[in-house]
Structures are given as C-alpha cells and as structure tokens.
Amino acid sequence: MLYDKMCYNDDMSIARFKKRMYFVVARYFRHFANMAFKRWDPRVIAVTGSAGKTTMMTMLEHEIGDKAHYSHDANSAFGIPFDMLGLSGIKGNKLKWFWLLIAAPFRGLFYRRKQKFYVVEIDGERPHETEFLAEWLKPEVTIWVSVGLSHAVQFEKEVENGNYNNVGEAIVAEFANLPANTTKRVYIDADSKLMVKATNNIKAKVIPIKKTLLKKYVVYPDSTDFTYGDTTFHFDHPEPKDVAFNLFVTQDLMKYLRLKFNPDFTGLKIAPGRSSYFKGVKGIDIVDSSYNAHMISMTSVLDMAERMHAEKKWLVIGDIVDQGSLEQEEHTKLAKLIADVKPDKVILVGRRTKEWTAPELKRLGISAVATTDPRKALEYIKRRIRGNETLIFKGSQYLEWIIEKLLADPKDAKKLCRRDKGAVARRKSWGLDS
C-alpha cells in the first residue's frame, strides 16, 4: 500500500510539473512561429467555441477554398505554432520533441505560407489557452460558435481558487478573450445571453446571428435542406438544425470578404465523426457523430434525430467525458433528451450512461440496453437489425469501432474518426480488434 501511495504521489508530481511547463514550452514555439506569422501576414479568421468549431471551419473551406490556409488538427497553444511553422505535432513518438525543438528556430527564420487568409480553430481546453492564442493572433474576424461545459474538469481548479463562481463562468471568460482581441468583426449566437454579455463592451463590431430566421429545416439520414428567405442550402449528409448559425455566418462573412457564396454544400468534406452518413449491413442507415460528446453537441444531434425523417430510429449513445464533478448531473439530463426523440431502441455504451442515464430513462418509461463493453453493444445490434433502421451514433467509448463492424463497405472505415496509431493501440488495449 505504501508503494502504491508513493507511485500515486510521483504521478501527481509529474502531472503538476507538466502543467506548469505547458505554457513555458508553448512560448518557445510561439516565439519562432511569430517570425513566420509576421512574414506571412494573413487576414486571420478565428473559429472558437465549445462544440461545432470543426464543422464551421470545413464550411468556410468549402467557400473560401485555396485562398486560405486552414489549421486542420491544430487548435492548441502547441498545435497552432506548429501549423504556422509547417510542422506536424507529436503523434506517438515522444522523441520527436527533440526534432521540433531544433527545427522551430530554422522554420521561424525561413518558412512562409502564401495564402491570403488564415482560418484557425482555437480551443478553450484549459485555462489561459484561448488567452495565450488570442493575444498573439489578434484575429480580424472571430466566429464564436457555441458555449457550454466542454472540458469542464479543467476549469474546476479556477473555481476552487475563487477566480470564478462556477465552471460555466470560467469557461465563458476563457472564450471571451478571443472577441476581446479581435480587430474587426465578431459573430455570436444572438440567443446566447452569455455570449451577448461577454461581448458587450469590445472594440470589434459584434454581429448577433438569429437562427430563428431559418424558414424551413428538413433532414433525412442522407441529406439536409435549410431554407432561409428564397435560398435553400443543401447538404448530402445529415446536419443538426443548429448549423443554421454556421450558414448565416458563412453567407455574411463571404459578403464582407467580397467573395462569392455558394449555397450548395453537396460534397462538403466534413471531418470524421461529425454527422457522416454511411450505408450499413442489411441495408441499415448509419449516422456517425462519434467524434466527441459534450452536452451542447449531444443536444444538437439528438434534436436532429428527433426531427429526422426515418422509419425506425435507434440511438447508440456513449458517455459525455471531461465533466468532472458535473458527470452525474449531465448524464441524468441526457436521459430527457433521449426520451424526446421517441427512439425505437436505445443502446447506451459506457460507465456513466449505464450508471446515471439508464436509470433515469427507466423512470421516464424508456427501455434501454446499457453496457460498458462495445462488443456486447455490437452483438446486440447485429442480432436485432432487420434492414429498415437508422442507427444514430453519438458519444465516446469507441463507438467508431461498432460502426466499422456495421459498414456495408469495409473501405468506408478509413472515413471514421480515430484512425491514428495511438487510437488503434487504445482500442486494442480494450480488446477491440482493428
């Protein structure tokens, strides 16, 4: 027991050291990235929020095209400097840190991107990260997509230290650093009182977007149409109704940038695990939103599921992670959202949904299958599907592995999320073969 306690204390000490050193090392890379940034001098369009950032960025890429560079897979205090220097981050091999430390100064002296615009995704995963990037990049335009309790566990210490009254307040304050450092335009959700209050006295022009102006929303497992005024925006995959915000922002932004706007989003290259559509075995339809699960994105996808035109709706729901002390509260709320869909079947995968969501669903009169083992969930689905079902996946717990085993075309597996070597190794550690 004494040995275990010593190991635990050692692990905690290492974790605290890494946390203290995070911004120290990040400043090293930012210093050299700033040389390349000044040489490049792009018009910066920043996208931030608790959820929906990547979808917003892919829509901008669809419209702006090769006139911009996009910070794909780079949204942190390390990722963005690496992206600015044309370097890839750490994926598996820790020795690569030595190469990056040596390469950064040389890249800072000579590397330069050529695109007119820089569309950059900025996360607020930890305290001071958005602040660290906002004060450096000072974007011309910021798009604040959403605000919710994403990565809530990271902000609990801020509340404990008396800096904020609650986690939600701390998260809003972190995101608000970006609008405060924006020079021209800030787009926010007009229905979010938190966003409105946080941008009340900033220098940039604030443009509140009213999603209620949407005239019509029609969603199927394999397509979506949004109608605004006389314009219909078409997608060849399902999208939540909240994407109306992205559409209105994109349309207005293109006008501001004096670029042509195309309302047809057919062929939009969406990131893996963000409402992708696949044909499944036995003729089933699969909607894949397995990349992550914050409550805000869970709410959006379940609202889409409720409105979706489909014969039989099955929900496969994983845990909401990084919620800290709010875990029980969030997973209990989740049950009501699931019940509102009136699904034909509910399969819950994960410790948290099994412990808190399943009992609440039972209280609401909804039967659910709950397991912590993705293999058992897959077995249950395979035994019961008949071919006229639409399976909507949302959440963590390696739901992408279940989807892979249900694809009509195995080649579609390359379009799923978490295909990197690290993710494959983690799945294998769970006993999930690739």
Image (spheres, rainbow, N blue to C red):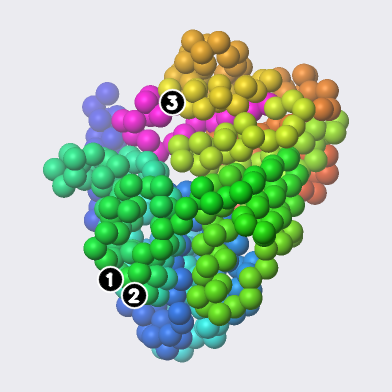
**Residue that protrudes farthest toward the front in the picture:** 229
Q: Secondary structure at mark 1?
A: loop
Q: Which amino acid type is shown beneath numbered disc 2?
A: Thr
Q: Which residue is mark 2?
A: 183
Left or right of 133, for residue 224? right
Mark 3 closeness class: few <14, some 14–19, many ≥20 residues within 10 Å: some
Give how far apart the Cα atoms at labels 2 and 1 are.
Answer: 7 Å
Q: Quadrant of residue 166?
A: top left
Left or right of 60, for residue 403? right
Q: Examine the rendered structure and indicate whether residue 333 appears above or below residue 363.
A: below
- Point out residue 272 in the picture as x, y percentages from the top left corner: 64, 51
- Point out residue 39 in the picture as x, y percentages from the top left corner: 42, 88
Give how far apart the Cα atoms at labels 3 and 1 are.
Answer: 38 Å
Q: Which amino acid type is shown beneath numbered disc 3?
A: Lys
Residue drawn at (60%, 73%) of the image: 64
Residue drawn at (24%, 34%) of the image: 6
Q: Which amino acid type is shown beneath numbered disc 1?
A: Lys
Q: Which residue is mark 1?
A: 203
- Point out residue 196 in the picture as x, y percentages from the top left corner: 32, 53
Q: Examine the rendered structure and indicate whether residue 368 appears above or below residue 117.
A: above
- Point out residue 12 in the picture as x, y percentages from the top left corner: 27, 41
Mark 2 and mark 1 residues within 8 Å of each other at the beta carbon: yes
Residue drawn at (73%, 40%) of the image: 221
Q: Earlier in the sequence, mark 2 or mark 1?
A: 2
Residue span colored magenta: 314-331
Q: Is residue 416 visible?
A: no
Magenta stretch: includes residue 232? no
Magenta stretch: includes residue 315? yes
